[in-house]
Structures are given as structure tokens and as C-alpha cells.
Image: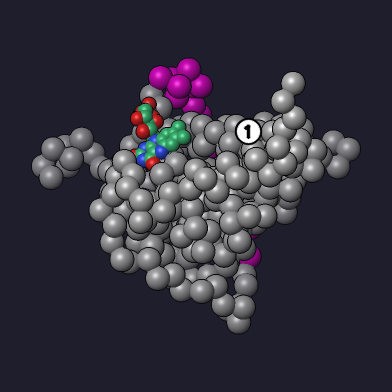
């Protein structure tokens, strides 16, 4: 049996990154990527996303049939209640046992390496900016006020739909939560965890009548800089965008 090489997980993470100077499946790089730094002086504030607001009735089998990736969004903001429901769907706590916070999405070893950052663009009664979702306490912590959706779109290989979405979810992995138990194999589990979370976002958005698309194509280092993580101990792994869909009629008129 070949012994597992130490650091192969981190090497995998680094060597599968996208960089602007290389060509990828979508490449029309803009230079609009100078991110404002997160400032310590900016007062941090928190917004509770619990208790869970009432959710519309939805039939799981219909939702599964309807789920699709949508990339055309209208200018209509989503409601704050919808954002609360989406957050619950991605990482909401559903049970506490022996100190474990079990959630809507499964996680290898119940280690929950994935963190959720929320880039608010158009959410009713919420100021635009970057927020971090504190799962255990059920609140959003404001990290930085401002309109960063164009920066995010630029960092997502210039996928302009990112700038049009009402809200973007940026999922990072706090790697040591998984590696301390699973070592290098943890990198597999991290991405599986993220996949479950992404599907939950799709299903919840569909149930709310919203459009959703998950995103795996991005310049890792640019997203990490935008949200203020180091890219090693914590690094972006996946994203998802949500908004009201442009009607088919308006799409045809475009
Ligand atoms: C891991 C993953 C990464 C994806 N990344 C992107 C992306 O960067 N841009 C995009 O437009 N769609 C992305 N998608 C959406 C896929 O293109 C979409 O799921 C696929 O075309 C099938 O269509 P459907 O979701 O409507 O069934 C991604 C989906 C997954 C699961």
C-alpha cells in the first residue's frame, strides 16, 4: 500500500486554483479587482436571523422536478424573511446533542468545516455589504458595508450574473476542523459537505420561487482577499447566488 503523502491535501487545494494569468474555460479578465480592505475600525453589528419566519408550503417532489440553475435576475430585492429561510436551509441548526450542532445539511464526522459569508446586494431592509453567518447563535455579523458585487463577479471569472444577483453565498472551509480527524482525506469531505449545502440552497430557493446558481469557477485568492480569509487555514470552496428571476417574457425581449 502506498503511504499517503503529508500535505497532499493542501497541495491539491493550491494546485487546482484558478489564476488570472492562466486561461480557463471563461476568461475575459477585467482589472476591476482592487478590493477594499476590511477595516477594524468599522463598527461590527449583528442581525438576528432567528426565529425562523414562516415558510411557504412546498412539495419536495415538485421542488426536485423544478430545480434548475438560473442566471438571469431582476432588480427586485428579495425579502429579509427569504434570506433567513435560505440561511436556515444551508446551515440551520436542527438539533443539539452532546455538544454537536446538527444541521440541515450533513457533514462528515459532524465536524462542520464550512462557514457561510453573505454578500448582500438587494435584500429588503438590509444594508449592502459583506456579512458572516454565525450558525450557533443564528445571526449575521456585518463585516463591511458597501457594494462588492462587481468585485465578486470579477473574482468569479467575470461571470456578470454574480453582480446581478440579490445575494451571494460564499462558502469557505476552516480546514483544521476536518484535517485534525481525517488528515489529507478531509479535503474530499470538505467538498462533499459544500455540495450538500449548495443543493440545499438550490432547493430552498426553488421552494421560495427564487432563482439560484451555484458557482465553482472563481479566482480563489481574489475571493479570499475579498472576504478577509488567509486561503490556507480558511479558504473559499464554493459559492451560490440567488435572486428573483427575470420572467421568460422579459428574457425574450432582451
Ligand atoms: C460544483 C458546481 C460548480 C458550478 N459552477 C458554475 C459556475 O461557475 N458557473 C455557472 O454558470 N454554473 C455553475 N454551475 C451550475 C451548472 O452549470 C449546472 O448545475 C449544470 O449546467 C446543470 O444545470 P441545472 O443545474 O439547471 O440542472 C455549477 C454547478 C456545480 C454543481
Kindly identify the residue that appears in the image at 45 percent across and 24 percent down.
Answer: 63
- Which quadrant does the N terminus fall into? top right
Q: Mark 1 highlights which residue?
A: 188
Q: Nearer the viewer, residue 98 or 29?
A: 29
Total numbered labels placed on residues in the image: 1
Seen from the viewer's position, the closer of residues 151 and 244 is 151
Residue 73 magenta-highlighted: no
Horizontal side of 91 relative to 69 (left or right) equals right
Query: What is the x, y in percent for residue 253?
Result: 11, 42
Q: Is residue 77 visible?
A: no
Residue 182 seen from this side: yes
Where does residue 35 sit, x and y in percent of width and height? 44, 70
Please check the rendered image and state whether residue 52 is part of the magenta-colored stretch, yes or no. yes
Ligand 1 lies in quarter: top left
Nearer to us in this view, 2 or 67: 2
Which residues lie in the magenta part?
46-65
* Furthest residue in direction right, as rendered: 98
Tell me the SS state at disc 1. helix
Label 1 packing within 10 angstroms: few (<14), some (14-19), many (20+)? few
Q: Is residue 99 left or right of residue 63?
A: right
Q: Image point 51% across, 50% down: which residue? A: 170
Residue ID at (52%, 55%): 118
Amino acid at each position: 500500500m502506498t503511504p499517503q503523502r503529508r500535505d497532499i491535501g493542501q497541495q491539491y487545494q493550491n494546485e487546482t486554483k484558478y489564476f488570472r494569468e492562466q486561461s480557463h474555460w471563461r476568461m475575459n479578465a477585467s482589472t476591476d479587482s482592487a478590493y477594499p480592505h476590511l477595516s477594524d475600525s468599522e463598527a461590527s453589528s449583528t442581525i438576528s436571523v432567528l426565529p425562523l419566519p414562516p415558510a411557504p408550503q412546498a412539495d419536495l417532489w415538485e421542488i426536485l422536478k423544478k430545480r434548475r440553475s438560473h442566471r438571469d435576475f431582476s432588480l427586485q430585492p428579495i425579502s429579509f424573511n427569504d434570506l433567513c429561510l435560505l440561511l436556515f436551509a444551508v446551515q440551520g441548526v436542527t438539533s443539539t446533542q452532546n455538544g454537536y450542532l446538527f444541521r440541515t445539511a450533513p457533514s462528515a464526522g459532524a465536524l462542520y468545516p464550512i462557514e457561510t459569508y453573505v454578500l448582500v446586494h438587494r435584500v429588503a431592509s438590509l444594508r449592502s455589504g459583506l456579512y458572516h453567518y454565525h450558525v450557533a447563535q443564528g445571526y449575521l455579523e456585518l463585516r463591511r458595508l458597501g457594494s462588492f458585487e462587481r468585485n465578486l463577479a470579477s473574482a468569479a471569472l467575470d461571470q456578470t450574473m454574480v453582480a446581478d444577483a440579490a445575494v451571494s453565498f460564499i462558502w469557505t472551509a476552516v480546514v483544521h476542523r476536518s484535517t485534525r480527524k481525517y488528515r489529507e482525506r478531509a479535503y474530499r469531505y470538505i467538498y462533499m459537505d459544500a455540495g450538500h449545502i449548495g443543493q440545499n440552497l438550490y432547493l430552498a430557493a426553488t421552494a421560495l420561487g427564487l432563482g439560484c446558481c451555484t458557482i465553482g469557477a472563481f479566482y480563489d485568492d481574489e475571493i479570499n482577499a475579498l472576504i478577509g480569509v488567509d486561503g490556507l487555514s480558511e479558504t473559499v470552496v464554493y459559492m451560490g447566488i440567488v435572486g428573483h428571476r427575470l420572467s421568460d417574457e422579459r428574457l425574450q425581449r432582451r
